[in-house]
Image: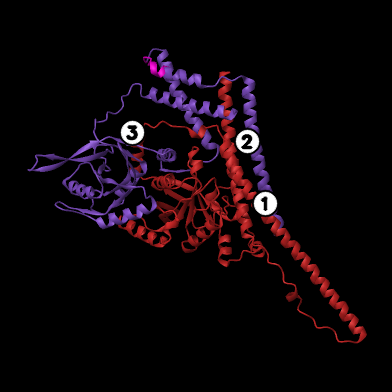
């Protein structure tokens, strides 16, 4: 039971901690404004974006953009995009050709592995939505109800990779010219826990000068995590000092988080904590001893057999 | 029906003290993986593999000098009973053909598998990896440990069979003499190849953008103090393996006892024969014919040593994992003590 107490308190502590750090950092900056949207929220997994980037890098000579199918699951208010594959296509001034056979085939193959994924839309790299997009969108409307169109600006025209999602809506005068309008949707990113840990590692690789990095092991990881917590502590401390010396106005909500933080460290008497700590350490040491013993045993066994 | 496959694995090469890349005498000294492959593997396990089932897939890439670059991968569907006529080879061929159309590297360079608490050392893995390595010299098997990853840091290891083990598998000689000849211990079965993760610049830009846009708070699982659950399961698996090992040892003991008993009987028989012959000679009778002794006393079958090797390798792997885990937890406990010390 001591272990449970430990575990709860310290993980709560860290949660509140990171929350307060986040609010400290955002104290002065505004969050990026979302366009107010109707329609489902689009939740994208990072693997989809990495896939799109990769297929853009591998595009054929002369192709200015790549397109592909998005797979995922549809919910009442949201569409979750979990997978994608690129589809070969040819685009010229006045015509566009998409290899639909290929798309169907790939979808079948993918369905074998994850039967719960359905076609939810399609993606295209590039900044604008062209007329050809309308045609392609029509094709996809036949495959899925209300397909989502995702664009990702891989050429970084505006200095950023604008990742946007659209839904098509009919517009125009009934009976006369009818057109299609793409209404934007709000895009959120959804991560599984393990995905987030993978992304953390990938983020660390990009900081190295030659963009490569090995996987660390053992205590290095704990050391790294401790270092990160230390950085966060430093940020919080500078904020507090600024407030104390009057350089920044105090924000009450941040103050409340900080108070939560300090109060979360459990108040245990020194002896109780000693006992808890010692019993945990004893458990771990015993397990280490046992595993060392087992390893010695099997090594010995092997030597004896070979004799 | 996915059984938990056990495979023999010996992660460290015998000369583990020096840097692993410099002393491997295999054609592949380093593995370079793209971030996309990592993400795909994570997603595959998350969505399709729950509990102790393993998920598998194929790695695609190319070989550059002494590096193996893995640039893409695709998953394999699970085996289910109602898919009896599912043709794996056909699926693979179609997938690779399709990927070729979109300019993805279609060269098969290995395969990946997820593992449950590190229990991947098994006959099945050995056989698969052998057939891969036999066909393609540089192939590797990537073992992805999702439970360890969920505890805070990505756990991905690449293994190849050592040349010695390849020889043995080729000869299919798994008896004790064969293994003794090749001097293979459970530590010399697999060699671990160091992994490096590399991303193109476009993906790096994407990472920056995601970091900016994403408001998911860090959860710091790595600093989690609870350890009993994980330790319990690991020790349970270790106990099972040790039981298997002891059964195996008992089998071997009975075999060697039978063998020595038989040797004794043989000697006794030969001696008696000789005595009788000597007696007969003294009495002037014809000596009895020398019978073929070996046909009368058929030697017992030596038990196959391969399983023992696998079990030993698996036990070794479990122990390594447990030790790593406990050392991390000890570090965390001391950190907690420091935190408490300041406040009390």
Q: Residue at x 65, y 36 (%)?
A: A285
Q: Which residue is tagged 3?
A: B213
**Do the CB atoms of the residues marked 3 and 1 lie less than 8 Å apart?**
no
Using the numbered discs, state the Cα–Cα distance from disc 2 to disc 3 in whole angstroms. 40 Å
**A254 falls in the magenta region:** yes
Mark linked to residue A299: 1
The chain identifier of the residue carrying mark 3 reads: B
Mark linked to residue A284: 2
Q: B36 above or below A189?
A: below
Can residue B326 be seen? yes
Q: Spot the purple chain and give its letter.
A: A
Q: Residue at x 67, y 51 (%)?
A: A299
Location of residue A72 (image quadrant): top left
Percent x, y of residue B279: 90, 81
Using the numbered discs, state the Cα–Cα distance from disc 1 to disc 2 in whole angstroms. 23 Å
Location of residue A168 (image quadrant): top left
Left or right: where A78 falls relative to B297 = left
Q: Spot the red chain and give its letter.
A: B
Residue furthest left in the image: A176
């Amino acid at each position: 039971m001591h272990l449970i107490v430990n575990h709860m308190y310290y993980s709560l502590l860290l949660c509140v901690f990171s929350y307060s750090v986040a609010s400290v950092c955002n104290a002065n900056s505004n969050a990026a404004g979302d366009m107010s949207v109707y329609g489902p929220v689009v939740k994208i997994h990072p693997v989809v974006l990495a896939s799109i980037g990769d297929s853009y890098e591998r595009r054929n000579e002369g192709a200015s953009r790549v397109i592909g199918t998005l797979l995922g699951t549809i919910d009442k208010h949201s569409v979750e995009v979990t997978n994608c594959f690129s589809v070969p296509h040819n685009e010229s001034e006045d015509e566009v050709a998409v290899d639909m056979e290929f798309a169907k085939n790939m979808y079948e193959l993918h369905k074998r592995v994850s039967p719960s994924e359905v076609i939810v839309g399609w993606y295209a790299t590039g900044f604008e939505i062209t007329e050809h997009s309308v045609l392609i969108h029509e094709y996809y409307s036949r495959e899925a109800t209300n397909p989502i169109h995702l664009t990702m600006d891989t050429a970084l025209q505006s200095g950023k990779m604008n990742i946007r999602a659209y839904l098509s809506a009919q517009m125009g005068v009934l009976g006369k010219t009818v057109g299609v309008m793409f209404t934007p949707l709000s895009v959120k990113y959804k991560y599984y826990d393990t995905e987030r840990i993978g992304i953390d590692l990938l983020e660390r690789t990009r900081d190295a000068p030659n963009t490569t990095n090995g996987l660390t092991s053992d205590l290095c990881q704990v050391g790294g995590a401790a270092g990160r917590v230390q950085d966060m502590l430093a940020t919080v401390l500078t904020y507090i000092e600024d407030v104390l010396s009057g350089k920044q106005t105090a924000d009450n909500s941040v103050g409340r988080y900080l108070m939560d933080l300090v109060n979360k460290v459990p108040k245990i008497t020194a002896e109780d904590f000693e006992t808890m700590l010692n019993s945990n350490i004893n458990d771990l040491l015993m397990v280490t001893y046992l595993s060392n013993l087992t390893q010695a045993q099997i090594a010995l066994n092997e030597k004896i057999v070979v004799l | 029906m996915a059984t938990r496959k056990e495979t023999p694995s010996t992660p460290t090469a015998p000369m583990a003290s020096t840097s692993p890349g410099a002393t491997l005498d295999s054609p592949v000294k380093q593995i370079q993986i793209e971030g996309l492959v990592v993400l795909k593997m994570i997603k595959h396990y998350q969505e399709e593999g729950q509990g102790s089932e393993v998920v598998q897939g194929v790695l695609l890439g190319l070989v550059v000098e002494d590096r193996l670059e893995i640039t893409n991968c695709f998953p394999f569907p699970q085996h289910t009973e109602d898919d009896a006529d599912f043709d794996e080879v056909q699926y693979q061929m179609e997938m690779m053909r399709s990927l070729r159309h979109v300019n993805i590297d279609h060269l098969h360079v290995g395969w990946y598998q997820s593992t449950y608490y590190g229990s991947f050392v098994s006959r099945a893995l050995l056989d698969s990896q052998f057939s891969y390595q036999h066909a393609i010299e540089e192939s590797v098997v990537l073992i992805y440990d999702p439970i360890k990853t969920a505890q805070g840091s990505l756990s991905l290891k690449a293994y190849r069979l050592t040349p010695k083990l390849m020889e043995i598998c080729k000869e299919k000689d798994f008896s004790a003499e064969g293994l003794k000849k090749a001097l293979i211990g459970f530590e010399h079965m697999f060699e671990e190849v160091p992994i490096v993760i590399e991303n193109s610049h476009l993906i790096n830009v994407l990472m920056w953008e995601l970091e900016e846009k994403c408001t998911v708070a860090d959860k710091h699982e790595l600093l989690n103090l609870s350890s009993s659950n994980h330790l319990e399961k690991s020790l349970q698996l270790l106990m099972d393996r040790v039981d298997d090992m002891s059964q195996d040892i008992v089998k071997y003991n009975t075999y060697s006892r039978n063998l020595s008993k038989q040797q004794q009987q043989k000697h006794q028989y030969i001696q008696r024969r000789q005595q009788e012959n000597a007696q007969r000679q003294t009495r002037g009778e014809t000596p009895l014919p020398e019978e073929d002794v070996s046909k009368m006393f058929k030697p017992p079958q030596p038990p196959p040593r391969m399983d023992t090797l696998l079990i030993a390798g698996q036990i070794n792997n479990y122990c390594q994992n447990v030790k790593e885990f406990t050392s991390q937890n000890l570090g965390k406990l001391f950190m907690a003590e420091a935190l408490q010390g300041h406040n009390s």
